Image (tube, rainbow, N blue to C red):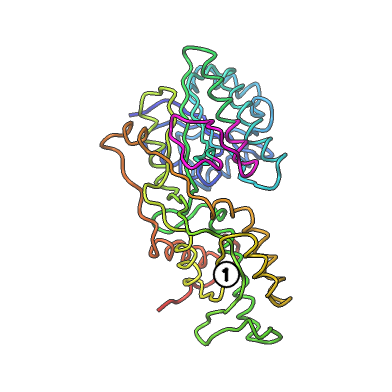
Amino acid sequence: MLRDTILLTGGTGALGQMLLPRLLAKGHKVVCLVRAEDTRTARRRIERIVGSHPNVKTIRGDVTEPRCGISDLDQEQMFGRVRRILHSAACINFDDQEQTHCTNVSGVHHALELADRLDAWNLLHVSTAYVAGDADELSESDLYIGQRWRNYYEESKFVGETLVKSWALQRDDRRITIFRPSILIGCTDGTTPTYDGYYTFTGVVDRLADTLRARRGNGLPPDVWTETDGTVHLPLVMQMADKAVNYVPIDWAADAMVKLLDVQPSNSTYHLVHHQPSRIRDLTKWSLDYLKVAGIQIVETEPEKRAAVARQSRFVQALQRKLDSVHRAYVPYCTSDPHFTLDTTQAALGEDFRLPAIIDQQYIARLLAYAVSHNWGRQVRKPALSNA
């Protein structure tokens, strides 16, 4: 059965790459809004994901521009045909507030502006469960409960949700659906469309270890060495509490979102979170064991970390700065343990609801085997580590 046409933003992003083939498999026609110099370049980017598919149309656009930068001609062709917009474009940048605002706040405003121009009645918006900020718990019916945000990314997603809900209240015939995934991690089979989040700091550790293995002890301080099996002893330090972190498989989240498109829109918010999140220290140990890195000290507080760094050699402190440059942004997610309800999502899907795979040591091994063999998304591949 051929379903309605959906305008998809962020189709070349990590989540978008998961959503697009699933939408097509369900019989939807999809118009992909792609940021590119021209339509030909935009089309090539989509074809790398799903090939030349008869139910895909690609247009050049940019959510940071008014009406998402879509030409008047493209707007005319979509008017009355595209009635639903799935807005998954987002910026996950904890450092560049201007870029984050342009995409996550102005981008939402422009998507809503475009919805009005196209006479689209249903906007499906991808937010994040971490609009919870520093709150201990967030239900699907909650948005602002007095929480504070740990970075501008969280705050910008809160503002985006506020804009979407305000838009829905302005007319009785408008309907919204808000998806709140937690921290997306690679697919259940180990593959991944991108290498951010979890892969950012594990990749740094792997590259540091590779560099030290290549030196074979030459010019290294006595507190850094490599064993015969390739294990690198590296006295770095990472700050994380003995708490859980809510990683969820990105393919599971995409599956659930596409299923929820069949649910009658009712201005609902759906959490896409893990029912049994893993302990962050377990995940870190499994990752370091796979990457054959030993000696990293785990501390709970910033003063403990400063004391540990002060005991490092200058050589190790230089490596520590490289690790901190990427890990620092993730410390809030390594030191808190918010609880998210799944009630609305489970109730809406009923018998179609499936729990996500447990993220255990075997899961982590699959992720890292794929990442290492694909050189963390870089051009040259390298063999997977042997852990026999």
| 144, 347: nearer the viewer | 144
Verify whether residue 190 appears in magenta: no
Where is residue 210? Give x, y as percent.
Answer: 60, 75
In the picture, which quadrant includes the N terminus? Answer: top left
Where is residue 69? Give x, y as percent.
Answer: 67, 29
Question: Residue at point 63% right, 65% down?
Answer: 305
The magenta segment: 133-159
Verify whether residue 142 appears in magenta: yes
Question: Total of numbered circles in the picture?
Answer: 1
Question: Residue at point 53% right, 82% down?
Answer: 230
Q: In this rendering, would 301 be left or right of 178?
A: right
Q: In this rendering, would 322 be left or right of 26?
A: right
Q: Secondary structure at mark 1?
A: helix
Extreme residue in the top direction: 172
Dominant SS of magenta comes to loop
Question: Relative to residue 43, is residue 118 depicted above or below?
Answer: above
Where is residue 41? Give x, y as percent.
Answer: 63, 42
Question: Relative to residue 356, is residue 145 depicted above or below?
Answer: above
In the picture, which quadrant includes the C terminus? Answer: bottom left
| 287, 250: nearer the viewer | 287
Check disc 1 and report the residue beneath it. Answer: 206
For badge 1, the amino acid type reads: Asp
Graded by Cα atoms within 10 Å as few (under 14), some (14 to 19) or many (20 or more), the crowding at tag 1 reads many
Question: Residue at point 63% right, 78% down?
Answer: 212
Q: Quadrant of residue 309?
A: bottom right
Question: Relative to residue 238, is residue 39 depicted above or below?
Answer: above
Where is residue 380? Give x, y as percent.
Answer: 59, 67
Q: Quadrant of residue 365?
A: bottom left
